[in-house]
């Protein structure tokens, strides 16, 4: 039960059916090629993060939206299987979100059709504000309308909650919300868009990256944690404290959902009251495990697996 004892988090975000296709190479414009495998798997950045947090042992609730269709019913069952307290708006006029995911060369390319995710409004969330009221940490992404996310941030901040925003996919945001966040967790590409710093996409050293992070801190962010995939994470806060946690070398099966796992593990650690460095180490280890299994939610590790990996690594 949420809120009975111990910390808990609420994830507000998207829920998709992932149509995952493995392909031996990527098609050129106008070309048709043969893929090797197709799977229908539960996904969506919001739902992935909720599942990851629950598997890490956190009391987790999820707020999102689905269409009144077969995919929506399947997604609901998935959340229930993970003991996630969910409150989904069922939108009869909309379809459940889908993501077309191409897996090639140990990496992915994703096109999302948001469906119901794209229609969720602040009044839909406000009707479920008790989930926010009782949470220690509120975790959001940008696969639901940014205006809705902004209202959630304002409400949660007003209630004294620690709000973590994973700005994926990147979208310009009103700068007034940055001071209201506990931390922002872009990847390199998202940071390049939010900070207007395309140079970080090709830079090999941390100086250029730090400059882009400082630009975000200058907008009022208390802290920022940039995920660098196999290279780990870099952190900076408004007092000028920075650290880098290197990535862990793993046998990669599928990177889909690794970023979601990172964000969930970070939120779980913050809810447990850990320092940002401890939280980053835990989140790096959790997301390292996530890439060793196929599928976004299927790859999310249990807390014991993360602890074992950390004992070996640190
Ligand atoms: O982060 C991975 C997720 O992005 C996939 O599960 C897909 O649904 C898209 O939302």
Image (cartoon, grey):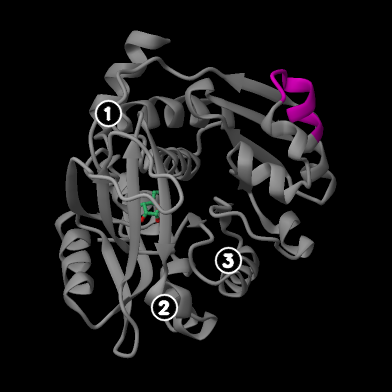
Residue depicted at x 66% and y 54%: 181
Residue depicted at x 50% and y 41%: 270
Residue depicted at x 29% and y 89%: 92
Drawn side of residue 297 relative to residue 124, left or right: left
Residue depicted at x 41% and y 51%: 110
Of residues 143 and 177, the one nearer the viewer is: 143
Q: SS of the residue at dot 1? A: loop
Vertical comparison of 78 with 106: above or below? below
Specify the segment rendered in magenta: 203-211
| Residue 128: mark in rendering | 2
State the predominant SS element of the stretch in magenta.
helix
Q: Choose the circle earlier in sequence order: 1 or 3.
A: 3
Look at the image and tell me in which quarter the N terminus lies: bottom left
Magenta span contains residue 144: no
Of residues 231 and 183, the one nearer the viewer is: 231
Q: Quadrant of residue 314?
A: top left
The percent coordinates of residue 221 (x first, y second) are 74, 48
State if disc 2 and disc 3 touch (CB < 8 Å). Answer: no
């Amino acid at each position: 039960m949420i809120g009975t004892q111990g910390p808990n988090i609420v994830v507000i975000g998207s829920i998709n059916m992932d149509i995952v296709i493995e392909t031996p190479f990527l098609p050129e414009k106008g070309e048709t090629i043969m893929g090797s495998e197709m799977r229908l798997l539960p996904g969506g950045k919001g739902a992935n993060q909720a599942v990851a947090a629950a598997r890490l042992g956190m009391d987790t609730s999820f707020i999102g939206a689905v269409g009144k269709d077969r995919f929506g019913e399947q997604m609901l069952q998935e959340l229930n299987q993970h003991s996630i307290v969910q409150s989904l708006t069922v939108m009869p006029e909309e379809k459940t979100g889908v993501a077309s995911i191409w897996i090639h060369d140990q990496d992915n390319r994703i096109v999302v059709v948001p469906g119901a995710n794209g229609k969720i409004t602040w009044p839909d969330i406000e009707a479920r504000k008790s989930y926010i009221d009782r949470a220690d940490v509120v975790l959001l992404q940008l696969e639901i309308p940014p205006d809705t996310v902004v209202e959630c941030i304002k409400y949660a901040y007003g209630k004294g909650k620690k709000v973590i925003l994973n700005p994926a996919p990147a979208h310009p945001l009103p700068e007034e919300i940055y001071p209201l966040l506990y931390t922002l967790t872009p990847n390199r590409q998202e940071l390049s868009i939010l900070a207007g710093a395309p140079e970080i996409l090709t830079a090999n050293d941390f100086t250029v990256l730090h400059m882009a992070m400082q630009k975000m801190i200058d907008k009022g962010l208390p802290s920022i944690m940039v995920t660098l995939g196999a290279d780990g994470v870099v952190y900076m806060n408004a007092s000028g404290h920075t650290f880098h946690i290197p990535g862990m070398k793993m046998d990669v099966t599928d990177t889909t959902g690794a970023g979601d796992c990172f964000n969930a593990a970070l939120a779980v650690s913050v809810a447990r009251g850990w320092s940002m460095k401890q939280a980053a180490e835990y989140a790096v280890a959790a997301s390292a495990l996530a890439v060793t299994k196929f599928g976004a939610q299927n790859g999310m590790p249990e807390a014991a697996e993360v602890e074992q990996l950390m004992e070996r690594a640190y």
